[in-house]
Amino acid sequence: MLVSDNATNRETFVTVDLKFPVLVFDIGGSHVAASICFENSYRLGPVVSALHPPEHTSDAFVDFLYSLGTKASAGLEGVSGAELAIPGPFDFKNGVSQMRHKLPYLYGVNLRQLLAARFGWQPASVRFLLDSAAFLLGEVAAGAAQGVSRAVGITLGTGVGSAFAIDGRLVTEGRGVPSGGEIWNLPYEGGIIEDFVSTRAIQKNYQNQTGVTAEVAQIAERAANDPHAAAVFTEFGRHFARALRGILSEFAPQVVVLGGGISRSAHLFLPAAQAELKDPNFRLLPSALKDSAPLVGAAAAWFNGPHGARDSSMPANPA
C-alpha cells in the first residue's frame, strides 16, 4: 500500500495484511459515520453514526472519532488502520485540515498524528481522501458505476462535489477533466455552477416564488401538492443538465452517479434533467449505495491504492 511518511515527507510502501479489515469514516458537516470493511466483497460491518460533539475543539473531535471507531470495530482484532473520507480543502498527504468555513476548529490540525496516537498506530496507518472521491470509488467498487469504463460522481448538497474515474481509477486531469476534477466553481450563466445547483439554489428559488423559507427536504415533501415546489425541482434539473452537458461532453462518461442530500429527491428533478440532455447514452443514476458509498470508497482507496483500482505494477502486499 502506498502511504505518506511524515518524517521524510516522501511516499513509501508499508505492508498491509489484506485478511484484516480497515476502519472507515465518512466525515460530514454535521455528523460522522464509521464502519469496518473487508476487501473480499467490500462488505461493511455495522455502521455507527453520530452528530458532531458539542465541544468544538480538535481534542474533542479526535476523541469523538476514536469513540466511533472503537464502537464500529468492537470485538475485532487486527484492524489494519483507518481511511477517512473528509471534505476539502485538506492536505491529504500530511493529514492536516485546511478548512476554515467547515469544522474551523480543525484548521491546521494534524489529524493523522493525533488519530494515530489515539488508536496506538503508526501515522502511516491513518489515511485521508476527498469525500466526493470516496463516493465515486464506492460506486465504482460495488455500486452504480461498477464495471463502467468512464464514470463521474457528483454529490449534491450545500455544495457540489465531483470526481472522475477511468477504468476504476480516479483521475484529476486529462481530456475532459476539469482542474482537480472539481466542477462547483466553473462558470455558468453569469455565475458559477454552485449558484444554480446546490441547496441554496433550491431554497432561494422557492423563497422567490412563495416568500417562504424552507429546507430542501421540506420543499421536496410539498412537491406532490405544491406546484411551486415541483417547479423548483424541475428548474433545478434543467440547470443541472445544462451545466453537465457543457462540462462533461468531452469526457463523455457512460454514467453519472448522483449522491448527497439533494439526490434523495432525484425523482423530482431527474426526468427534467434527462429530457434537457436529449442523449439516451448519457445516463444519470442515483447512488446504489446511498450513505454507504463514501465508506465503501474509503475502503477501496485503502485496499487498492489512493486512486482506486489496483495498479497491476503494484504488488497486492508490498514489502
Image: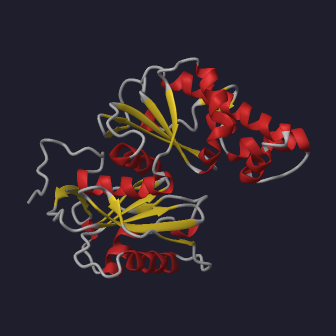
- Quadrant of the image for the N terminus? bottom left
189 left or right of 105 in image: right
At horizontal 42% and vertical 41% (from top left) the residue drawn is 144
The residue drawn where x is 55% and y is 77% is: 57
| Residue 263 in the image: above or below residue 272 | below
Q: Residue furthest front?
A: 224
- Residue furthest toward the left? 319
- Please give left or right for residue 186 compared with residue 317 in the image: right
Near-viewer residue (314 or 116): 314
Q: Taking 53 as reference, is 23 left or right?
A: left
> Where, by quadrant of the figure, is residue 172 drawn?
top left
**Quadrant assignment for the C terminus:** bottom left
Q: Position of residue 182 (x, y in %)?
A: 49, 38
**In x, y percent, where is residue 201?**
73, 41
Residue at image location 69% in from the left, 25% down from the top: 189
| Quarter of the rendering containing residue 124 | bottom left
Provide residue 276's location: percent of width, then percent of height: 64, 21
Say how the picture is coloured. secondary structure
Taking depth in this image into account, of 144 and 310 the one nearest to the observer is 144
Q: How many marks?
A: 0
Q: Nearer the viewer, residue 275 or 134?
A: 275
Q: Residue at x 77, y 46 (%)?
A: 203
Where is residue 15 shown, x and y percent of the image?
14, 63
- Towards the viewer: 74 or 54: 74
Q: Residue furthest right?
A: 211
